[in-house]
Image (cartoon, rainbow, N blue to C red):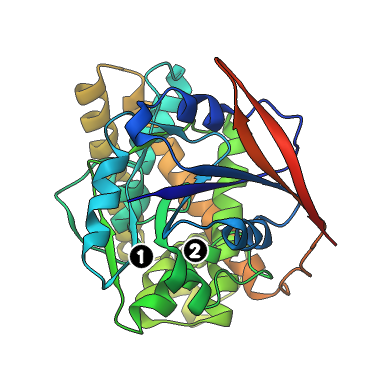
Amino acid sequence: MNYSVVIASINADKNIAALKALNQLPAHEKPKTVFVCVGQNPSYQRNLGVKHCKTPLVYFLDDDSLTIPGEIPNLISHFQDSRTAVAGGPNLVPPDAISFERTVNAVLASWMGSFKVRSRYAAIGSVREATEKELILCNMMVNRKTFITEGGFRTDLYPNEENEFLNRLLHKSYRLIYDPRAGVYRSRRKSLSAFCVQAFRYGRGRAQQMKVYPCLSDLIHLAPAFFLFYLIALVLPWVINSDCLLLSLLKSPWTWIPLFLFILLSIITGISAASWHRRFMDVFKVPILIFLRHSFYGIGLIAGLFTTLHKPAKNVKVYQVQWTAKAYKLKFLSEDK
């Protein structure tokens, strides 16, 4: 079955790694057409890209998603069932990733670091029907007709636009598939500050998504915000000098048990990561990154609950990729203002 690729990027002059990887695929696995949509609103860029596609399937990739030979056919195979609207797989840490990226990946792929969404960062389990918690937009194939019929992505929501879209599909009984055999390589954040900013953005995006399309399954994502309030509550009795009964109760040793349990489980995760990946320092680094991930995610959640959705920026240029022997060039097609 033919498929097209849509890539959202911020700059047409950027060296797009995803295109180089696509060009290295075997001939029978290459897409029929590839569109690069350049702008500042990835949701709108992808919607516009789909409109240019003529194939029954559209494959969304980020501009740094590196396709792996032999894995795309696994995604395509799931659309033999007419109920399938979306199929996707994990984004994996590249083989040439630096040490910090590998530690970040150990956090993202762990239960303590990501809970159920860890399947987005590691090939976990077998092929199965999925929810938005297991699928990720940097490696996601959709049925084009269904995508258009259901209105595509909300253009005022980024990130988490795919999560809201997938929830809409689930509630209309469409079939979503997670296939661990259909991965792409994608770099992780290379610095501590970038890692924390990413966690904040994910938290803010989740909160905004919950405001526009609330689901009971999203309640678990509020845990980091409650974790923050819990940490503040532990500190309050020591900074406020008062005989208040509540503050006195918070001084009880029992109130520290959840924190000790969190630390213990994080250390166990660090030991497991260090033994599995043969990086001794992960014993110390992984627990710290787990703590920072949940803390900044929680801050992002709180910020997202009190911020409005951004106004969609619709100045988008669409290019079609033309392949040369060893590279590519972009042919300008249209500009949407």
Residue 162 is marked as 2
Where is residue 330 drawn, in percent x and y?
70, 34
In the image, 126 versus 190, the foreground residue is 126
Is residue 82 positioned above or below 290 on the image? below
Query: Which amino acid does the dot numbered 2 rest on?
Result: Glu
Residue beneath label 1, please?
Answer: 255
Residue 164 is marked as none
**Quarter holding residue 121:** top left
Where is residue 211 drawn, in percent x and y?
57, 80
Element type at mark 2: helix
Query: Which amino acid does the dot numbered 1 rest on?
Result: Thr
Point 53% across, 60% down: residue: 298
Element type at mark 1: helix
Is residue 149 positioned above or below 193 on the image? below
Point 53% across, 32% down: residue: 18
Is residue 312 positioned above or below 14 on the image? below
Considering every residue shown, the one lying at the far left of the view is 126
Point 31% across, 26% down: residue: 283
Mark 1 burial class by Cα count in 10 Å: few <14, some 14-19, many 20+: some
**Quarter holding residue 135:** bottom left
> Badges 2 and 1: C-beta atoms under 8 Å apart?
no
In the image, 139 versus 305, the foreground residue is 139
Where is residue 335 drawn, in percent x and y?
81, 54
Q: How many marks?
A: 2
Of marks 2 and 1, which one's residue comes earlier in the chain? Answer: 2
- Asked if residue 190 shows in the view, the reply is no
Point 29% across, 57% down: residue: 116
Mark 2 burial class by Cα count in 10 Å: few <14, some 14-19, many 20+: many
Where is residue 142 drawn, in percent x and y?
41, 60
Quadrant (top left/top right/bottom left/bottom right) for the C terminus: bottom right
- Asked if residue 81 shows in the view, the reply is yes
Is residue 252 positioned above or below 37 on the image? below
